[in-house]
Image: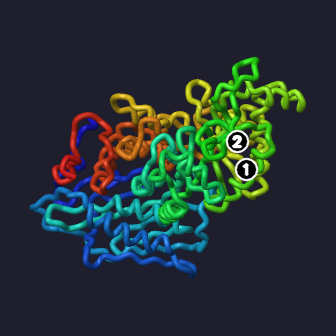
Amino acid sequence: MLGRVCLLFILSASVLAYDPTEYLWPRPQQVECNQDVFYELDEETFDFAGFGPGGELGPLTLAFERYRKVIFDSPLIAKRNTDATKLADGELRVLSVEVTSSDETLGLETDESYILEINEYEIQLKSATVYGALRGIETFSQLIHQDEAGTFYVASCTISDKPRFQFRSILVDTARHFIPVNVLKQHMETMSYNKFNVFHWHIVDDQSFPYESYTFPNLSAQGAYDQDHIYSQTDVKDLIEYARLRGIRVVPEFDSPGHTKSWGNGQPELLTPCFVPNTTTPTGDHGPIDPTLEPTYTFLESFYKEISKVFPDQYLHLGGDEVSFNCWETNPAIKKWMVKHNITDYAKLEEYYEQRLIDIIDKLGKSYLVWQEIFDNGAKVRSDTVVSVWKGGSGMQAELARVTAAGYRVVLSACWYLNYISYGEDWVKYYQCDPHDFEGDETQKSLVMGGGAAVWGEFVDATNLIPTMWPRASIVGERLWSDQSVTDVHDAGIRLHNHRCRLIRRGIPAEPTEGPGFCSPEYDPVIL
């Protein structure tokens, strides 16, 4: 039975008798804790200390400030045996963080490993990069408890940890419904609590174009819902830096040639005019971007030149999914162009567009992700292309096998569309999906970069993004971080409940993960 209070303790003669590992999420690769040895932390004297090979450890300095509040302002009230004579096994006053590399680059090769040692002499956290240190500090914060007398304790533990996959993302759609900056920041904060490292920003779509382009200001001026629902250049820079300080990359997606109706409001010449079939009579409707016009590619060159400067990540997501050919098929000018260029298949026309776009991105020195249709349609892509597999069902494993057999990197999201709501403990099915669950050799498996959860925005806005996402996305976080052998649903249910309660205490309105139960009277969502 998973419904329970946040704490399950067995009273004994020691000060706090419980298993600290029941509070770790995602589960570390290697963890050993002594359930009978705890050290006291004094809020007034406890401090963080960072050491590195010269230079400022900017993300760590700010992380120390954040986690002081997380640890001491949102404690976990623990139970202890009031008859115990031994209140602690000593006091520890410093978390010493040692980073060996000054490289603060975020990318597919970033080292996020760390070693955390808590013993009677010290709390020592060692990592290669500041981002590994951030993951270790989060783990440290999850080990701290507070008793009814107000005293903070941390268990004696040794943890050696690193992510199983390098790409652990969450897609947020800000086009169907605008999501304010403060809500996106709360979401990014929660991502850091779950060790995600990629914010996949599906920023524009058919419905609206909220990105404020300085090269083409009409895109948002005419394409956004209104001028109050726009991400300014200042907003975008603010979000990118906010994410970086939490070890999170921002990968923007500007999907094309489909999903672009809002683009046409500000740049009407981009879209394809639709016609009554087999006539020269326009319907007044417009379809995807017209791939036969040279001004289309002049626009794309200028637009992506801007995007490559605004978003510093090495990768852009180029989209390429769900392109309807209906409008192209009715357009006389497109049909004439296809005859002239000996193109008889509209899928090949899409391939022509994608190839031209990819060539533009190549010249900008950027790498890219694409939805699986680009690969399926045979576009020639670079060897470092990452293919996003999003189509679920029985074909998911076969697609993973085909993409990796062709030598391309892949990320999986097909089984983690969290906007699909179902009654009951739906997290279990997410927990049982694994990116390596397909027929392929070790070389193919090594090409799987990871995956990500997605929340599409048709019925999601600022009012329900966070509870819809969390803690269901936490499941994906553990699957992408922890060892492949971590599959025990019962164990995960206990830890997930405790983790959800921790998110509540940290101010995150995370929804319940199981049936009737509660966290604690002090932190029940009703009184937040």
In this image, 386 relative to 10: left or right? right
**Few, some or many C-alpha atoms within 10 Å of disc 2 (few <14, some 14-19, many ≥20)?**
many
Q: Residue furthest left?
A: 83
Identify the residue shown where x is 38% and y is 29%: 422
Q: CA distance from mark 1 to mark 2?
A: 9 Å
What colour scheme does the image use?
rainbow
Q: Residue furthest bottom?
A: 54
Q: Does residue 478 appear in the picture of this structure?
A: no
In this image, 428 relative to 528: left or right? right
* Front in this rendered view, residue 111 or 469: 469
In this image, 144 relative to 305: left or right? left
At label 2, the amino acid type is Leu
Q: Percent from the top left, x then y, of residue 141?
A: 35, 62
Identify the residue shown where x is 47% and y is 54%: 195
Q: Does residue 293 appear in the picture of this structure?
A: yes
* Front in this rendered view, residue 399 or 132: 399
Residue beneath disc 2: 270
Residue 299 disc label: 1
Sequence-earlier tag: 1 or 2: 2
Q: Percent from the top left, x then y, of residue 499?
A: 33, 49
Relative to residue 405, is residue 201 depicted above or below? below
Q: Percent from the top left, x then y, of residue 358?
A: 76, 47
Q: Are marks 1 and 2 in contact (CB under 8 Å)?
A: yes
**Few, some or many C-alpha atoms within 10 Å of disc 1 (few <14, some 14-19, many ≥20)?**
some
In this image, 106 relative to 523: left or right? right
- Looking at the rendering, which quadrant does residue 339 occupy? top right
